[in-house]
Amino acid sequence: MNFAIAIHGGAGTIRRQFMTPEKEAEYRAGLAESLEAGYGILRHGGSALDAVMKAVIAMENNPLFNAGKGAVFTHEGTNEQDACVMDGSTRAVGAVAAVKHIASPVTLARMVMERSKHVLLCGEGAERFAVANGMTLVEPEYFYTKQRWDQLQLALKEEAREHKQEAQLDHSDHKKMGTVGAVALDNHGNLAAATSTGGMTNKRYGRIGDTPIIGAGTYADNATCAISATGVGEFIMRAVLAHDIAALMQYKNMTLADAANLVVMEKLTALGGSGGLVAIDWDGNIVMPFNSEGMYRGYKLADGTGEIAIFKD
């Protein structure tokens, strides 16, 4: 049995001096809960697809993370979320973007994959599809957390003080918003990846990031690897980050570690982008590179060994 799982809860400027022991313990507990949810599926012979779903849903339900319950607010004070899931055994994909009334966007993404002929649905159309398939919509109040609301108010004040619209497109690390994701290999040799996000605080105009874009923020193929990325979506999309790593493995015979490090630490950086990813290959090797100050992350192997980490050092 050679199964394994890796997760992330977002990348950005994450430094010990800005993290209280209590808050760090909360984040570590949240990551551990997510890991155990996915690992439990794998340990009992379940599929990689089910494992990544369980892991991501656990973080969507945790207000600490920018997905589901803890999603950040747009400029208008709403919540617009994106998600994607991909099955490496078939390369089947489902994704949703800019949904406002879905408690678990990744669950809807899987529904798109399994119950429609489409890959990506967005906005009101995606929500009509959800209702047609038995999913209950939630009221906007479901997503409210004081921390996220305060982040929006601060962003609005900065925007007003600078008297320029460009403030809402600020990609500096300290304003990074976060994403959650998981990748897994099951004992049948199948890979899967899932990612979910609330996007950027103070975003406008229905902005959509890399998470639901197949080959950018999410990708899985049994022949190579499964990847879930986090970071500034505009740059991850320009790099076609996830697929680039898989292509380097397939066409250049690079290892997962070499390909991921090249793309994250060199190619993404050269574009001016920050972020990271978790990835696993067909042989169970796991990598978690990031070029930002930190990334909420963890992994667990079939023998029960693993790690949960937050900071760069």
Image (cartoon, rainbow, N blue to C red):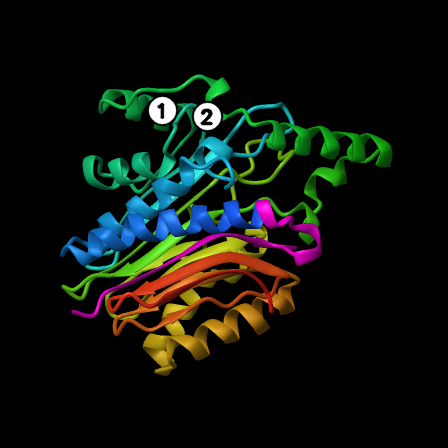
In the orientation shown, which residue stands out farthest toward the front? 21
Crowding near the residue tagged with mark 1, few <14, some 14–19, many ≥20 C-alpha atoms within 10 Å = many
Residue 305 sits in quarter: bottom left
Residue 39 sits in quarter: bottom left
Q: Nearer the viewer, residue 94 or 49?
A: 49
Specify the amino acid type for callout 1. Glu
Rendered residue at 56%/37% (across/down): 207
Residue 167, above or below 258: above
Q: Tell me if I can see residue 141 in this picture.
A: yes
Is 12 magenta? The answer is yes
Specify the amino acid type for callout 2. Lys
The image position of residue 278, as x and y in percent, is 42, 62
Q: Which mark is residue 187?
A: none
Would you say the residues marked 2 and 1 are in contact, meaning their CB atoms lie under 8 Å apart? yes
The image position of residue 181, as x and y in percent, is 41, 51
Bounds of the magenta span? 1-22
Q: Which mark is residue 127?
A: 1
Rendered residue at 33%/73% (across/down): 285
**Secondary structure beneath label 1:** helix
Rendered residue at 40%/52% (across/down): 32
- The first of marks 2 and 1 along the sequence is 2
Q: Provide the residue designation for mark 2.
A: 100
Is 215 magenta? The answer is no
